[in-house]
Amino acid sequence: MSTLTIRQLDERTHARLRGRAAEHGRSVEAEVRAILDAAVNVPEHNFLLSLHASMAKAGGVELEVPARTDQPRPVDLS
């Protein structure tokens, strides 16, 4: 386990942490650990999955995809 030291923490912030820790029935140290864990362990937001879900809820979208007319370039392997 790593150790983290926080210097020059405002007394008001420390007092609020103490109050919050008391509300949750844990030490200030445990409360700060819980806050940090919650802040950094947020599931990543996948924009494309969210967009897909939103479009599915809206009934989807029909897009006309034009046929490709260009030909692949020849490859010179010499």
Image (cartoon, helix red, strand yellow):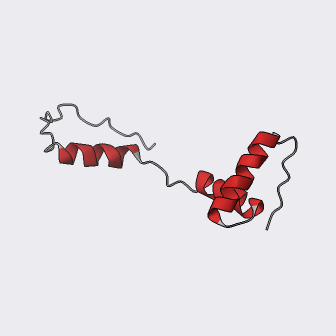
Q: In which quarter of the image is the N terminus?
A: bottom right
- Count of marks placed on residues: 0
Judged left or right of residue 21, residue 71 is left
Where in the figure is residue 18, as x and y percent of width and height?
A: 74, 54
Where in the figure is residue 74, as x and y percent of width and height?
A: 33, 37
Q: Residue at x 75, y 64 (%)?
A: 27
Q: In which quarter of the image is residue 4?
A: bottom right
Q: Which residue is drawn at 33% across and 46% down?
A: 50
Judged left or right of residue 6, residue 75 is left
Tell which of 2 and 69 is nearer to you.
2
Judged left or right of residue 14, residue 38 is left
Q: Which residue is drawn at 84% across and 48% down?
A: 6
Tell which of 30 and 54 is nearer to you.
30
Tell which of 36 and 2 is nearer to you.
36
Where in the figure is residue 49, as x and y percent of width and height?
A: 34, 49
Where in the figure is residue 33, as x and y percent of width and height?
A: 70, 60
Q: Which residue is drawn at 49% across and 51% down?
A: 44
Above-or-below relation of 65 to 48:
above
